[in-house]
Amino acid sequence: MDIDSPANVSFFDFVGGVQLLQGEDTRAAMPVILIGICVSGAVGNLLILLIFIRDFRNGKGSEVKALLASLASTDLVILLLCAPVRAVTYYKQTWTLGSFVCSTTDWFQHSCVVAKTLILAVSTRAKHSLVPSTAMGPLYSPTWIHGALAFIWIVSMMLPIPQMLFASVLSHGRDTICVSVMPVCASDFMSLFYKIYPTAAFVAPVIFTLAYYTKMLHTAVNHAPSPQHQSKVTLVLLCLSGALGLMLLPEWGTFTWIRLGYNKPPVGLIIFAQVLLYACSALSPVILMTMYDDVRHGLITIWLIATCRGSKHLPSKQCPKTEGNGAEVAANAVSNALSQEKEKTFPDVEHFWTGRRNTQVEEDQDPVPWEREEKML
């Protein structure tokens, strides 16, 4: 990836993935790794979205679930739109996606990453359980979440605008590369901006979120009267925030390192940081499925529904109705079994009494006529 930067620029960096790498191993391995992360992470985030949509349709939603659904949607967008661009770039080793994608790819990815961080920070204000409207008055409605998400995405798209302004397509011999070039005339202002931007978009929200959930977990475990459910949800959010902070730290570190004009970090560190960024989006659904009870019960319910629909040779009576969580699944199965026992009849006895009901014997064919005569007397 050796390339001479122009003399009138303050920094020179590749956009959309490291290009002009030497060696076939990286060219073959990186697309496979990124595609594997994309597929597994996309499936996990789709399942999370299906579970939360089902909970909201059944009236079991909450403010935290709304924000976690938004987080899963953001992860899904990163895996489906941003990671494939890097996979193609690593495979081709040149830029083949045009000037528009070159200008917007890093800007869009940074917008999604900043939105993830801010969504977790806003989740500190959200309620962990559904509060009925009668408890808070008729005007209670979690509409603040819609406003918060709109504000988060507006801020997230405005902060990385320099990523879009300085990206351009250049010719390198017979190849084409996508690079970010900042002229010297803008270096003073952008040097200050690249010190404020990572602090405001990553460092401060992550530290605030981790400190808040650590304090809340300590309070829930030691002082709350019934800390079980609240502490579990708090632990899940703490793990999500910690995983995001640790796995995005190399990406933000290399990004700031290059933008502040220092010597370029090793290529291996840059590639490792990019892989961790996408692995973070694939790890979030794993944390939710293993630690969040509502998600785990919803996953079991979806599996039961898919199993029953996939078994065409089984009658519909054998598939329990999955209207709620795992406990309700068992209760529905038991109630269906009891109803089947009540409806069960013995065919031979039923045929006997049906044949004997409302029958009259002719006088000529009556085998015991004296009994009838005695009754008449």
Image: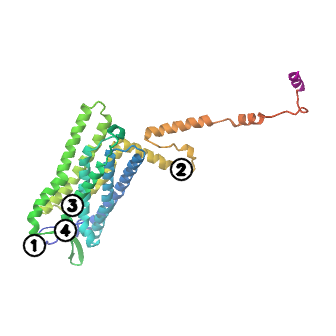
Quadrant occupied by the C terminus: top right
Q: Crowdedness of circle 2 by 10 Å Cα count: few (<14), some, many (20+)?
A: few
Span of residues in magenta:
369-377
Image marks 3 and 4: residues in contact by CB distance under 8 Å: no
Q: Is residue 311 visible?
A: yes
Residue type at mark 4 is Leu
Q: Earlier in the sequence, mark 1 or mark 3?
A: 1
Q: Which residue is mark 2?
A: 311
**What secondary structure is found at the residue carrying circle 2?**
loop
Between marks 2 and 3 in the image, the one whose residue lies nearer the viewer = 3
Q: Nearer the viewer, residue 75 or 155?
A: 155
Q: Position of residue 314 (x, y in %)?
A: 57, 47
Q: Which residue is mark 3?
A: 158
Q: Which residue is mark 4?
A: 165
Q: Position of residue 276 (x, y in %)?
A: 25, 55
Indicate left or right for 321 with 106 as reference: right
Above or below for 68 versus 26 = above
Between marks 4 and 2 in the image, the one whose residue lies nearer the viewer = 4
Q: Residue at x 62, y 36 (%)?
A: 343
Indicate left or right for 299 with 282 as reference: right
Residue type at mark 3 is Met
